[in-house]
Amino acid sequence: MTLILRRLALAGALAIAHATLGAQGPEVTPEMALVARADSITLGEYCDVAGRVLAVGAVIRALEADSTEARSNAAIICDPLLSSFSLLALSGGSAAPMAAVARLRTEGSSAARARVFAAMSEFRASVRSDPVRRTVQDSGGPTLSAELTRVTETAQQLFTLGARDRALTRLARYERKLGPQSARLNLPEVLLNYSAQRWVPGFRPTPLGGPSPWEVVASYVPGYATMVDGHVEPVSASEFGLRRYLFGESFGRPGLIGLVLPSYWSVGVVTASDRNGALVWPWQGADRSGAFVSWGTIKLAYIKRDRGTWLMGKQFQIVPFVF
Amino acid sequence: MTFQPQSMFWRGTRAILLVHGIGDASAGKEGTFPTEVLDGALGDEAANVSIYRLNYDFINDWLAAKVNFQAGIAALKAALKLKFGDDDSSATIADYAGDVLWPVLSAELRFALRDAFLAQLQQIQIDRGESALERGDDPLDYQVTIIAHSLGCFHTYEGLTAAAQEPSHALRPASDLVTFDSVILMASPVQLIRTVAGTIGPIIPDADTLATISAPLAIPSENRRGRVTPCTSDFISVTGTHDPVGGFLLGRKLDWAYMDIPGQRSVIVPQRALDIDTKEGTALALAKAFATGGPKANDPHSWSAYIESQAKLLRGTVLA
């Protein structure tokens, strides 16, 4: 849905740009030009061009063994139920045409559209590679060659645009997990997370999947606070648990809004000494354990001491890479 | 900062992607892109060549802030010195090998850098297509050259290998018809990383996803229906005779550090004028090269110097 809105906004911006005089309109970017053109070419046009190219005998001869597959791919492209779809609509970048909506619910599934795009990609690889490309130019004529270039390259450009968006989405997730809005790690956490990424399923990043949302928490936290007889007292504690990064586009905001839409939440076990104070060793004296949960940098913990104690804290490092 | 790949309509029919190496390539910093030198090398034609710059310093900054990576590099250097010993020239190289090796130690950093590289390549393909179609030209007649320096060669090698082999990137040379006019790697540490990584193999995460060490070095290619199509027909390695990052020390080629990929065009740049004749001199020159500030007179690793010295080669390949 976000993608559709974004592409519609791009197409709208381009329409405004064209309607505006001279250089006064917004600058047209290559992406805007692509989206506008992809919205003007239907699958039916692609099918028509493919059919005319494959009707040229010299092209079939140049394709050699690939000619059968090229014909098969052209047959997939020439899906009558999708012929009124623009290439942009097929890619999911804009709404389906009204006339196709009813069919969309039956035949125009995302799987069907993906199959058509795969066929277009294969068809292009066959007819646009050398020497077939030159044969189309020489035997099919410059007009047919230009039409073929226009439809095949537009479809491929949409493919590439989708791939770029996926790469940027992964990169944004890495930024969420490693960037300025992420939690800083201390040395034990660096080692534990390194180990988890190597040996624990679910922690490992993958080239196409991006980073894992999970991170191990193992820290000394001298910055909790609690209320004792109406007075605020600092509490030092240790935390062991898991942190999960929120990769949704809405999250990871800086500043005050980050309190509501943070980069991560965490949960785990907290241990504190029976003696309150900053920089107190958590296992000193009769230590007590409980649980903590955080929403972004704001943390809340409960420890079962004599009467039970609520702790509040904020995620930060006093000494970088230590605690 | 959220990464946005550079995008533009091309000025002519050619574009160059510059991928920087060690050091901060942000504007005004020591490792900044040598675009003026490149313009000078291309001469009058420079105005018709679109230049893209991939700056990935922000990703390095993420990890530097999140974990104490500098301490890790220092530990790695110490470990490498112990491993190589003080014989011959190896210890000199071990002293800075950590600088070029550290990306392999973080899978997240590596993948993030790869995605930035791929996103920029994909944007260049989109720009190429739109620039050509707008003029009624065929996008396949427009040319892209990649020029990488130092650590950027490693990221380029990794990125191009992923691009050539992974369908979802839409950048394969045969199936997606994405080929580069030339790929020029200047002072490539790819073989150096491959060798040194071999000595610390067990601690490298996801080693099977590292093209540099998981398979014999080869020009990134796609195997489509039994036919191997390389990502470029002109894969060029340029290195100086006094540049240990590129696998040379004191005029002597170090087989274990020099990248020698089958099919590559090798250019060795004589660096006698640098007046470096001892290991200590090399180490000092490199220290100055990698340090922020400081004189650069004898820098055997200078990207600008490589481009200046290879102006004829660049004109011949980029403008051919």
Image (cartoon, rainbow, N blue to C red):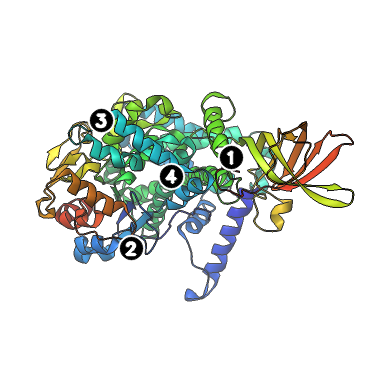
- The Cα–Cα distance between marks 1 and 3, rounded to whole angstroms, is 68 Å
Tag 1 near tag 2, CB within 8 Å: no
Q: Amino acid at mark 2?
A: Arg
* N-terminal-most mark, 4 or 3: 4
Instruction: Pinpoint the chain carrying mark 2.
Output: B
Classify mark 3: helix, strand or loop: loop
- The Cα–Cα distance between marks 1 and 2, rounded to whole angstroms, is 37 Å
* N-terminal-most mark, 2 or 3: 2
Tag 4 near tag 3, CB within 8 Å: no
Q: Which residue is mark 3?
A: B85
Q: Which residue is mark 4?
A: B70
Residue B40 shows in this picture: yes
Nearer to us of marks 4 and 3 is: 3
- The Cα–Cα distance between marks 2 and 3, rounded to whole angstroms, is 52 Å
Q: Which residue is mark 1?
A: A82
Q: Amino acid at mark 1?
A: Leu
- Can marks 1 and 4 be said to lie on one chain? no
Above or below — where is A250 with respect to A10? Answer: above
Instruction: Pinpoint the chain carrying mark 4.
Output: B
